[in-house]
Amino acid sequence: MTGTPVSRPRRPRRLLLVVAAGLLAVALIIDPIARHILAGGRILDLGVLELRLTYNTGVAFSMGSQLPTPLLLAVTGLITAGVGVYAWRSAPTSTWPTTAGLAAIFAGAAANVIDRTLDGKVTDYFHTGWFATFNLADTFLTCGVALLFIAMLTEARTETPKETTP
C-alpha cells in the first residue's frame, strides 16, 4: 500500500524535554537557596542527612580537583552534550523509563556544568557523614542511571530471541 510516510510520534522527545527541563530548573533553583540558607557555616541536621555547604572543584568524589577549571568545563560540557544528543536521537525508539532516565542524567550533568560555569566549582549540600557530600543534580544523575539500568534489565527480560533461518 502506498501513501504518505508515517511520522513518528513526538511524545518520547516531549517526555525527554519536559523531564530534563523540569529537573534542571529544580536543581538550578535549589542551589542558590542552599547557598543562602547554609552560608556562614550553618548546618541543618535532619537526622540521617545534614545540610552542609561545601564546594567541589573537581568532579565525582573531587577527582580532578587539581585540573584547570576551563579543562573540567570543556570535558564535562562535551560529555553532557553527548548525553543530550544520544538521548534526543534515541528517544523515538526508547521506552519511557529509558527516556526518563536519560533525561535525568542529562539534567543532573547540565546543572553541574552550569553551576561550575558560574564560579568554577559545584555547590554541594547533602551530607550523610558516611558518603561524599553531594547536591540535587548528583541525585538526578544517580537516579537516572538507576532508572536506565532497571529499564535495560526489564527490556532484556521481555525481549524474545529472534529465530534465525539457515
Image (cartoon, rainbow, N blue to C red):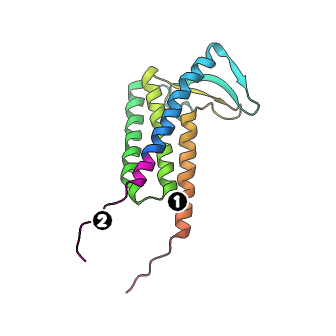
Give the CA separation, mark 2 to mark 1. 27 Å
Q: Residue furthest front?
A: 3
- The image position of residue 137, as x and y in percent, is 54, 35
Q: Is residue 88 left or right of residue 131?
A: left
Quadrant housing the C terminus: bottom left
> For the view shown, which residue lies furthest in the top direction?
40
Q: Residues within 10 Å of mark 1 (few under 14, many from 20)?
A: some
Q: Which structural element holds mark 1?
A: helix
Q: Residue furthest bottom?
A: 166
**Tag 2, which secondary structure?**
loop
Q: Is residue 134 left or right of residue 86?
A: right
Q: Would you place residue 105 above or below residue 92 in this image?
A: above
At which x and y percent is residue 16?
44, 48
Q: Which residues lie in the magenta part?
A: 1-16
| Quadrant assignment, res 80 | top left
- Residue 31 placement: quadrant: top right
Q: Residues within 10 Å of mark 2 (few under 14, many from 20)?
A: few
Residue displayed at 65% across by 23% down: 52
Foreground: 24 or 144? 24
Image quarter of residue 5: bottom left
**Residue under the image location 39 percent in, 85 percent down:** 165
